Image (cartoon, grey):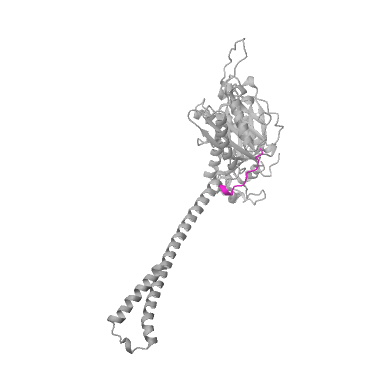
Amino acid sequence: MILNSLIFGGITSVWWALVWFVLPFDLRQMSVPALTLLHVAPPVLLMGAWSAWKHYRAKRAAAAAQAALDAQAAEQAAKIDAARSAHEAELARRRAYVECRGVWVASTTPPPDWFDGQPTHCAFLEQPAEETAGVGREHALRQSLREVLTLAIGGSPAVAWLPVYLLPGTQLAGAAQLELVRDAWQAAVADNFLEPAPSQADCKFLPGTEGIADRIVALFENDPTLPALLLLGPDSPLADAQEEDHDDDGPPVNPPGGKPGHAVVALLFSRPGLVTAYHADDSLPADDERDPYQPYWERQGGEAAAVGWARVPPPLQPSLLDLAPLATLHQGRVLQKQGGLARGNALTRQLQSLLEAALINASLREHPFDSADADAPPPVEIGWLAHNSGSVDTGGSRLAALASALHYFGSELNPIDQATNVVVEYGDTGAARGALLLATALLRAAQLAQPTVAAEFEGDDFVGVGVMRPAVGATT
C-alpha cells in the first residue's frame, strides 16, 4: 500500500512538472474543471494502467504456477496409476493356480488313517517292504511306477496323451530315470488295453529351480495349449539300503532325514476352467470321406482339439473332465540362506514372512496397493499341515516355529494331531518327498474342505512354504 502511494505520488509529481514547466499549456486561460482534469486524470490513468499490468502479470504467473502444479499432479497420478496397474498385474500373476484332479501314491507305508478311499479317483497303494529293501532302485521303482500309472490312465484314458514331468533323483542317471518311466508307461497303457494310444510317453524332467508348485504353474502360463499334465515323484532309498548291524547296548539311531523309505507319487494337474466342445453325438464322416493320413485326435471335434487341448483326442477329453477337481495348487515361497536358516524366534519370523506371501498367493490374505486401505485381516483357518521337520530330537524347533507362524495368522491348528510329518510316517523318500508333501496337503484340503499348508525343509539352508485350497464345488 505504501509502495503504491509512493508510485502514485511520483507519477503525479512528474506529470505536474511537465504540465507547469515543459508542456505548452496556458493554464491561466483554462477553466477550473479543465485545469483539475488536466492535473488529476493522467496520473490516475497511468496508475490504473500500472496496476492493471501488475495484476495481469501476477495472474499469468499464477496460471503458469497452477499449470505446473497440474502437470506435476497429472504426472504423479499417472505414476501412481502405472504402479497400481503393475501391482495388480503382479498380484494376478502371483495368484495364478492350477487344479489337482487326481492323486496316486505307492509306498511301503500303510495308507494314512485319514484316507478312507475318498476322493474316489485317488489311491494309496502299499508295497511290501521286504520285497523292496535292498533290491535296487530300478527294480523297486519299476513295479510301483507301473501300478501308479495304470491307476492314473485307468481313471481317464486322456492321461496317456498328457505330458509326464518327472522330479529327478540323484542316485540314477537322468537317461535311466526317463527310460524307467517310459517303460512303466508303456506297461500301464497295455494294462488298460488302450487303443489307440500314443507311440511313446511324452516324458521329461520338470524344468526350473523354484518350488514345485511355482514350476507347475509356470508350465501352464508358458503353454496356453497345455490342458493338463502328470507330475511324477519316484524314489526309493530303501531299495538301495543295506542291512546294518546295531549294537545290542542301545536302539538303532535313525538319520535326521528318517529311515530309508520308498514312494512313487503321481499328481494330475489341469488348467482352471478346462472345458471341451466335443460331444459324443457329433456327426462322423463316412469312412470313404476320411483322410487316412489325418491324425486320430483330429478326426472328430477338430474345433475342440484346437482349443487348449494339445494332442488329447476329442473323444477322450470328457473322461478327463469327469475327474472332478479336488483342490487348487497355488504358488508358494522359498527361502535359501547361505550359512543356514535362523533358529528360535528368528526362524519363526522367517516362516511368518514365507507363510504370509503364500497366503496372499492363495487369496487368503489381502495385499492392497496402499497399506492405508488395508483392513484388519481376519484369522486364517488352516485344516492340516504337511511337513518334513523330522523327529522330535532333530526337528522339534522347526515344528515349534511352524506352529508359532501359523498362530501369528490366527490359526488354531494343532501341529501334532492335525499334521503329517512325512519323515516320521514315510521315512526318507528322497526325490519323492516334495510330491508326497503336495499330495498330502491337496488330499487333506479336499477332504476337510479347508486350506492346508505344506512346508518343506532341505538341509539346513532351505525351506519352502505353500498353501493348498479345496476346489470350488469339489466333492469327495
Which is the main secondary structure of the residues drawn in magenta?
loop
- Specify the quadrant of the image occupied by residue 422: top right
- Where, quadrant-wise, is the N terminus in this rendering? bottom left
Relative to 288, does residue 399 appear above or below in the rendering? above
**Residue 369, position in %: x, y?**
55, 48
Task: Identify the residue at horizontal 61%, vertical 25% (top origin).
Answer: 396
**Residue 346, position in %: x, y?**
55, 31
**Residue 232, position in %: x, y?**
58, 33
Question: Furthest residue to the top?
Answer: 248
Relative to 254, does residue 63 appear above or below in the rendering? below
Task: Identify the residue at horizontal 57%, vertical 17% (top origin).
Answer: 242
How many marks the image carries: the answer is 0
281 or 171, nearer to the observer = 171
**Residue 303, position in %: x, y?**
58, 51
414 or 104, nearer to the observer = 414
Q: Is residue 28 magenta?
A: no
Relative to 53, does residue 160 appear above or below in the rendering? above
Task: Identify the residue at horizontal 54%, vertical 39% (top origin).
Answer: 214
Q: Is residue 244 visible?
A: yes
389 or 102, nearer to the observer = 389
Question: Furthest residue to the right?
Answer: 116
Question: Range of the magenta residues?
Answer: 371-381
Q: Is residue 150 visible?
A: no
Task: Identify the residue at horizontal 36%, vertical 79% (top origin).
Answer: 42
